[in-house]
Amino acid sequence: MIMSTKHMVLITGASTGIGREMAKIFAQNGFSIVIAARNRSKLIELSDEIKKKYTVEVLVMPKDLSIKNSAKELFDEIREKNIEIDTLVNNAGMGDCGFFHESSVDKDTEMIELNITSLTILTRIFSEDMVRHGSGKILNVASTGAYMPGPFIAVYYATKAYVLSFTEAIANELKEFNIQVSALCPGATITEFAKRAGKLELKGAMSAESVARIGFTEFMKGKQVIIPGFFNKVGLLFSKFLPRRILAYVIGKTQRKLHIG
């Protein structure tokens, strides 16, 4: 018996924050979705919520992408179900803050595995399928932190700089194969990580729903780099005129106040 191929959107880090809101917006617009994150119960809760509102298929795929080889496992599990991913949203990410020399090596390694390695692997293996099928879309979630050094949040900002640079490079490569690759670069956002890190003290922090809605709209328009929010756009514009050393000093003072006191 030949199984028909299902065409779906894969959203990682879908259990909370921007990923959760992005999943709801894709479903609202008629897309069937695969939602992946480490928290099974939150994924099931989200799936139930979406199915009550929209007539789309939702597939729950619990997976901790901070663990080595988990990205390939996720790809294989999706392929086994005869699902074709037309759109990939690499949203899963984590951060940490404080003095770098006091940070947990294990946690930093997990952060790099999740924010960089898994994102890269998922992009690599799904883009190969997209090239073969002649179309596709990829949205990688970076940050306004990708544009600047981040004292007291150094590894996180560095991983997001990688995501932005990587996205811009492969967007150029894959354009000729009818594949769109975009980066979403939110600033301060009201998420679980932001609550833990104290970022809600920052003026202009946006809701995850607002970031996701702007991100979805601009992504569907084909925009390559998406920066939600007026204050984020203006802040990045001014930052371009500051020497990197001065920028690091300014960011360092802000981050130290937020995360250390």
Image: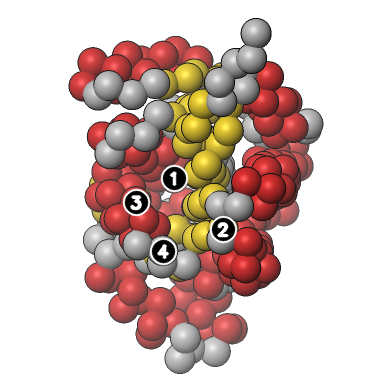
Q: Are marks 3 and 2 in contact (CB under 8 Å)?
A: no
Q: Do the residues labelled 1 and 2 touch (CB within 8 Å)?
A: no
Residue lying at the far left in this picture: please name it. Answer: 53
Q: Do the residues labelled 3 and 4 touch (CB within 8 Å)?
A: no
Work out whether mark 2 precedes mark 4 in sequence or the reverse, and give the earlier one: 2
User: Alpha-carbon neighbours of circle 4 within 10 Å: few (<14), some, or many (≥20)?
Assistant: some
Is 39 positioned to the left or the right of 64 in the image? left
Work out whether mark 3 precedes mark 1 in sequence or the reverse, and give the earlier one: 1
**Which one is closest to the eye, mark 3 or mark 2?**
2
Spatial CA distance of label 2 from label 4 is 10 Å
Q: Do the residues labelled 2 and 4 touch (CB within 8 Å)?
A: no
Q: Which mark is residue 197?
A: 1
Q: Is mark 1 on a helix, strand or loop?
A: helix
The amino acid at mark 2 is Ile
Above-or-below relation of 183 to 149: above
Task: Specify whether residue 110 is in view.
Answer: yes
Q: In the rendered view of the protein, which quadrant contains the C terminus?
A: bottom left
Q: Residue 216 carries which label?
A: 3
Residue drawn where x is 56% and y is 25% of the image: 5
Q: Residue 137 carries which label?
A: none
Q: Is mark 2 on a helix, strand or loop?
A: strand
Spatial CA distance of label 1 from label 2 is 36 Å
Q: Name the residue under label 2.
A: 179
User: Alpha-carbon neighbours of circle 1 within 10 Å: few (<14), some, or many (≥20)?
Assistant: some
- In the depicted view, which residue is nearer to us: 87 or 90? 87
Above-or-below relation of 260 to 162: above
- In the depicted view, which residue is nearer to us: 260 or 42? 42
Q: Mark 4 points at which residue?
A: 222
Q: In the rendered view of the protein, which quadrant contains the N terminus?
A: top right
User: Alpha-carbon neighbours of circle 3 within 10 Å: few (<14), some, or many (≥20)?
Assistant: some
The amino acid at mark 4 is Gly
Q: Where residue 228 appears, x then y in whole percent? A: 32, 62
